[in-house]
């Protein structure tokens, strides 16, 4: 009895509290396991509610993957101008160029931001393309009131953006998302959105002056449509960044040079020598998208009247980017707006005809697109091949960090690659239309601040012009004062006597 009583007492007084705690822990643990267990139906429901976002993500992922398998061509100006500006050279006085400052010639630029490496600039390029896709989706949802129609726009952009030199990074690559943002916020009935739209349009202008026609179109549209107060709100936003640019130019004492290179030079020397008009082959290659785009623009205007007038204005005005030089990269800003017009017109026809048209269109377009991928497939980076790497090494080995170097008709970004400055701290890209104006200044710098090493390539032709014809004085001076010490392919390495 005593033993049984003691055992019962121990159970009730000692072990039972522990057992209760253990039991409680097991129950709560089971509940946690049950609550955190994978529930397929919840995942399926989540996928159903986010299917459009998932499709958009897949389109963007595929788009980036395609670009990563193409030859990458970042314009060397992005690196060289940023590098030289960060080293204290003034735009238009020391760096002769025809563009507005943008992301290259201000003190805050790609180099100062730590983005002027080939790896980082490629990430920037891919992020810009992804941003364009997201903005196009948001715009598509708003103008069509349909996620599916918006996704078709994204698909068309995936189809055509790489084809129109989407593997190239240039000023248009930065301007395109700014214009998409500006269009997205262009709401004539909301002051805040209208101000933001103008602000972004003004920022785009600071990148490239060819935004002027679009600004003119939009300003006239808002002046006719809006009250004076709303119109002034847009102008206030629009003027902010251009005023900052003018203040910067005046503060550096370079307004005269700025005016010459960005206006006078473009309207005289460049318009005579640097223009690149479209040829028949170029027009045929652009026809699969833009011929359909023009027809769609006419159809949208007839069917919907003024409803999509801002979209039509953006599509038409962005074509001016390709006015001076007809390269596909200059058509990039107009691409998303024409895709919007095409999608609007397609969904105005019978669904069965729509399906048939899309199948036939993609089949025909594939002949153009496949050829493009065959020609541009690869992992190389233009201006950063084995030749450039070897020349860069030779120049570094034969100079000190403070020495000046000069490139004659050869690797344009050798200064950035070697971290060396040009003679006299004067620089211009050696296009014939630039050298016609700037040869005297460049030669003066070479004579007064002689480079230790010259990287020379003779017989270079640019758009039918022999570069040697526009650098004869420089060529004569180099021939008398420098001797060849090496050669990489067609590139000669010259050293000062």
Image (cartoon, rainbow, N blue to C red):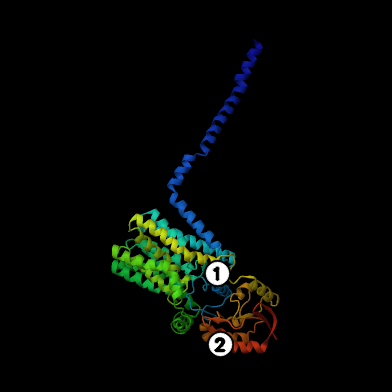
- Quarter of the image containing the C terminus? bottom right
- Please identify the quarter of the rendering in which residue 19 is found: top right
The label on residue 73 is 1
Callout 1: SS: strand
- Please identify the quarter of the rendering in which residue 302 is found: bottom left
* Percent x, y of residue 320: 41, 74
Outermost top residue: 1
The label on residue 133 is none
Residue ID for mark 2? 469
* Percent x, y of residue 322: 44, 74
Residue at position x 40%, y 57% in the image = 150
Residue 149 visible:
yes
Residue 305 visible:
no
Q: Is residue 21 left or right of residue 141?
A: right
The numbered mark, 1 or 2, whose residue comes first in the sequence reads 1
Residue at position x 55%, y 69% in the image = 73
Can you say whether 425 is above or below 17 in the image?
Answer: below
* Percent x, y of residue 161: 47, 64
Is disc 1 surrounded by few (<14), some (14 to 19) or many (20+) residues within 10 Å? Answer: some
Residue at position x 48%, y 56% in the image = 59
Question: Distance of mark 1 from mark 2, alpha carbons?
Answer: 28 Å
Is disc 2 surrounded by few (<14), some (14 to 19) or many (20+) residues within 10 Å? Answer: some
- Quarter of the image containing the N terminus? top right
């Amino acid at each position: 009895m005593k033993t049984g009583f003691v055992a019962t007492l121990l159970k009730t007084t000692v072990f039972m509290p522990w057992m209760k705690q253990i039991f409680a822990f097991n129950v709560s643990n089971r509940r946690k396991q049950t609550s955190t267990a994978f529930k397929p139906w919840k995942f399926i429901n989540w996928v159903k509610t986010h299917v459009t976002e998932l499709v958009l993500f897949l389109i963007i992922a595929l788009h980036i993957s395609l670009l990563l398998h193409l030859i990458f061509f970042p314009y060397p100006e992005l690196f060289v101008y940023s590098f030289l500006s960060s080293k204290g050279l003034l735009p238009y006085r020391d760096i002769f160029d025809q563009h507005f400052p943008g992301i290259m010639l201000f003190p805050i630029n790609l180099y100062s931001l730590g983005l002027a490496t080939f790896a980082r600039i490629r990430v920037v390029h891919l992020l810009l393309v992804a941003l364009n896709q997201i903005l196009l989706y948001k715009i598509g949802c708003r103008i069509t009131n349909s996620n599916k129609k918006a996704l078709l726009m994204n698909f068309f952009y995936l189809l055509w953006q790489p084809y129109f030199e989407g593997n190239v990074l240039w000023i248009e690559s930065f301007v395109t998302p700014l214009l998409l943002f500006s269009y997205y916020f262009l709401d004539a009935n909301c002051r805040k959105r209208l101000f933001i739209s103008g602000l972004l349009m003004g920022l785009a202008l600071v990148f490239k002056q060819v935004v002027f026609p679009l600004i003119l179109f939009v300003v006239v549209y808002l002046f006719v449509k809006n009250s004076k107060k709303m119109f002034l709100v847009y102008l206030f936003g629009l003027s902010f960044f251009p005023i900052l640019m003018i203040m910067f130019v005046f503060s550096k004492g370079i307004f005269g040079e700025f005016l010459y290179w960005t206006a006078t030079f473009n309207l005289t020397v460049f318009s005579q020598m640097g223009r690149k008009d479209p040829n028949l082959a170029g027009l045929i290659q652009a026809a699969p998208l833009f011929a359909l785009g023009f027809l769609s623009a006419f159809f949208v205007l007839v069917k919907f009247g003024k409803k999509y007038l801002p979209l039509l204005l953006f599509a038409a005005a962005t074509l001016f980017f390709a006015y001076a030089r007809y390269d596909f990269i200059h058509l990039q800003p107009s691409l998303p707006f024409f895709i919007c017009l095409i999608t609007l017109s397609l969904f105005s026809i019978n669904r069965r005809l729509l399906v048939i048209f899309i199948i036939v269109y993609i089949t025909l377009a594939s002949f153009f697109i496949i050829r493009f991928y065959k020609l541009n497939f690869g992992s190389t980076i233009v201006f950063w091949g084995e030749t450039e790497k070897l020349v860069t090494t030779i120049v570094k080995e034969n100079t000190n960090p403070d020495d000046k170097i000069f490139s004659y008709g050869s690797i344009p970004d050798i200064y950035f690659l070697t971290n060396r400055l040009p003679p006299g701290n004067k620089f211009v890209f050696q296009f014939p239309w630039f050298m016609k104006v700037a040869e005297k200044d460049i030669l003066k710098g070479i004579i007064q601040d002689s480079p230790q090493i010259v990287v020379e390539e003779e017989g270079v032709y640019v758009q039918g012009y022999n570069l040697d014809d526009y650098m004869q004085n420089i060529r004569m001076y180099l021939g008398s004062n420098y001797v060849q010490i090496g050669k990489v392919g067609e590139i000669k390495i010259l050293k000062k006597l």
